[in-house]
Amino acid sequence: MKTTTRNQYAYVNNILIAIVSAVFGYNFYHSIVHPENSNIAISLILVVITSVMVRKYGYKPIKEKK
């Protein structure tokens, strides 16, 4: 039984979620500890872009049985 993924963007979206979460967490920490050096607006833009990509392409691979 061979399975293939039809949603090729699922793996990329999972990596994107991890990277954006790390960047957002780091900038959120900076906004609390050092508010004068924070870039929280850029992080929020990344979060919105990631949300759009996940909603459009999904984050779980769809397996097809052959």
Image (spheres, rainbow, N blue to C red):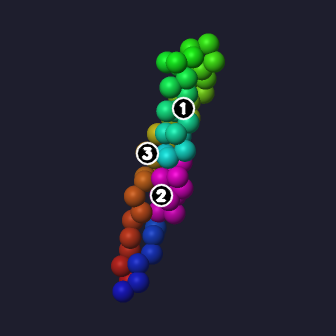
Question: Is disc 1 surrounded by few (<14), some (14 to 19) or many (20+) residues within 10 Å?
Answer: some
Residue 14 is covered by the magenta coloring: yes
Image: 66 above or below 59: below
Measuring from the top left, give residue 12's x and y in whole percent: 54, 56
Dividing the image into 4 quarters, which one contains the N terminus?
Answer: bottom left
Q: Is residue 53 visible?
A: no
Gap in angstroms between the C-alphas marked 2 and 1: 24 Å
Most common secondary structure along the magenta stretch: helix
Q: Amino acid at mark 3?
A: Arg
Res. 10 mark: 2
At 45% from the left and 70% from the top, the residue drawn is: 5
The residue positioned farthest toward the front in the image shown? 33
Q: Secondary structure at mark 2?
A: helix
Q: Earlier in the sequence, mark 2 or mark 3?
A: 2
Front residue of 39 and 13: 39
Q: Is residue 23 above or below residue 64?
A: above
Pointers 2 and 3 in contact (C-beta within 8 Å): no
Q: Is residue 22 above or below residue 60?
A: above
